[in-house]
Image (cartoon, coloured by chain):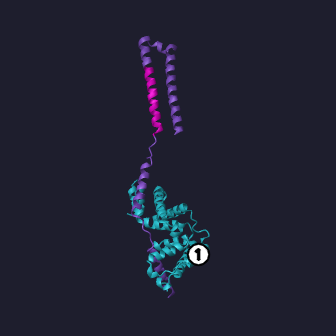
Amino acid sequence: MNENQRVQQVLSGNTSAFAYFVETYQDMAITIAHRICGNMQDAEDVVQESYVKAYRNLHTFRSESKFSTWLYRIVYNTAITQTKTRMWMGMQETGIEDAYDRGENTLEINLEEMDRREVVSEVLQRMPKGDALLLTLYYMEDNPVKEIAKITGLNEPNVKVKLFRARKMFKELLAECYSVEDVGFS
Amino acid sequence: MKENKIENEEKIIRQMMQSEMKKAPENLKFRIMHQIETRKALTPQKRKPKKESGTLLKEMGAIFGTMYAVMAAMVIGGYLLQGKDFLLTPQFIGPVVLVAAVFSLFWLMTRLEAVLKARKK
């Protein structure tokens, strides 16, 4: 059964069919919300609210786009509204400088001593929220630029530019704290 | 050579990012589904509006049916008691017109009430 058929099932009154969408996309939804909110508690609330909104507005879902893209867009908007975060305005330059400043003040940590996951988490936390979110969307679920543009409301060239900068910054921050060879960027 | 390096970097970043995927807590799905079920249960089901024309005909049938029954009783009574000629006299036509007027007024009042109720809704 494909997703459109499941959507039709939910619309015809079978609420339990919606559980499939919750189960399939909740991890990515919570990852997106966590990137924006910065903590798990708020992220959970955002995801819960987003799913309820998605259920309520399911009749507006057009099957031309993927359900995941539509849902992530709702999660993104709900998180932005709840946290009142400005994701892109003026982030570009100041965000990078801030991240580097913070990097200078931290102690060097040897990669071998930390779990890789913690390392990535640390680096992503230092990055501006918008950039970290773009990397999350691009690499975690292999979302194409077009889908990322739909989720974030940015245009495609803008996403490409920001993604390029975010990738560069990620590598630089990683290299700043940990030796480049350790992470394989030789 | 350069392409290989870029590909390798992309692969490493992808692996790193995928290890950073957050896991939703066990109870989140339950919480979401519970809220959705509750919302569904609390939402009033849409009732089909009563057909206005059907009600109108029933009302008319009831009121004017009674009116014609009363009139028929009057005609039969007048004919049996006073004879055929009495039915054409003003003494008989007057009360018949009165009965028709009373029932018509009653029907008008019923319609007026229905219109006012619909406006309130």
- In the image, residue A5 lies at what x, y percent? 40, 60
x, y percent for residue A24: 41, 65
> Could you say which is closer to the camera, residue A26 or residue B106?
A26
For mark 1, give the secondary structure: helix
Report the amino acid beneath label 1.
Answer: Ile
Which residue position holds label 1? Answer: A96
Is residue B22 depicted above or below A100 in this figure?
above
- The chain letter corresponding to purple is B
What residue sits 48% from the left and 76% below the top? Answer: A120
Report the residue that reaches farthest toward the top.
B82
> x, y percentage for residue A167?
53, 77
Colour of chain A in the rendered structure image = cyan
A45 vs B117, nearest the viewer? A45
A105 part of magenta stretch:
no
The chain to which mark 1 is attached is: A
Magenta segment boundaries in residue numbering: B50-72
The quarter holding residue A3 reads bottom left
The image shows a total of numbered marks equal to 1
Residue A99 position (above or below residue A47): below
